Amino acid sequence: MAGYPDEVKAVFAEWRQEKLLADLEGAIDELQSRRVEYVEYGDPETLSPKKRAALNSQLLRQALLHRAECLLQAAGKMLLAKNVYGLALVARGHVEATAVLGYFCKRLQSLSKGNIDFERFETDIANGLMGAK
């Protein structure tokens, strides 16, 4: 289990928040279990559009999982530093990552209902992965 350092655990113990600590460490473990070492992408020129969109979706998922894990780890550092601003940025980062996931869930629903064409969906996934518009 890759949780928080002992100094962070001491802060939670001092606040009598052992349950919260266990929940946060459980969340970190869950995020780590969902990550993979790499996504085998291959040559983008030889991939079909559907395969490329599927691989880009997997890459986006891995990037967001990594971000969520790093944000949870950063929360422990912010607690030790007594950095309330940093904790607010951690929360904001989680909201932004959740918004990205929500956006792509809606885009996938639009695609399945025929409201957007596949090429538009594929472009949206690629743009989301690159952080571009």
Image: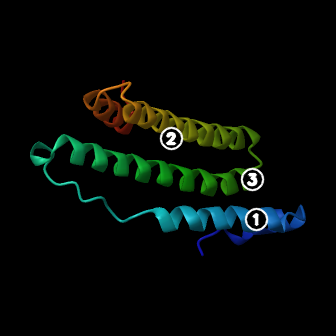
- In the image, residue 60 lies at what x, y percent? 39, 46
Mark 1 or 3 closer to N-term? 1
Mark 2: which secondary structure? helix
The amino acid marked with disc number 2 is Leu
Q: CA distance from mark 1 to mark 3?
A: 12 Å
Which dot marks residue 79?
3
Outermost residue, bottom direction?
A: 1
Of badges 2 and 3, nearer the viewer stands 2
Identify the image quadrant of the C terminus: top left
Say which residue label 2 marks. 101
Q: Residue at x 67, y 66 (%)?
A: 25
Looking at the image, residue 131 lies above or below residue 45: above
Say which residue label 1 marks. 21
Q: Residue at x 37, y 33 (%)?
A: 111
Comparing 100 with 108, the one in front is 108
- In the image, residue 107 lies at what x, y percent? 43, 32
Q: CA distance from mark 2 to mark 3?
A: 27 Å
Can residue 60 be seen by looking at this rendering?
Answer: yes
The amino acid marked with disc number 3 is Leu
Outermost residue, front direction?
A: 113
The amino acid marked with disc number 1 is Leu
Mark 1 or 2 closer to N-term? 1
Occupied quadrant, residue 98: top right
Mark 3: which secondary structure? helix
Q: Residue at x 67, y 52 (%)?
A: 75
Contact check, label 1 and label 2, Cβ < 8 Å: no
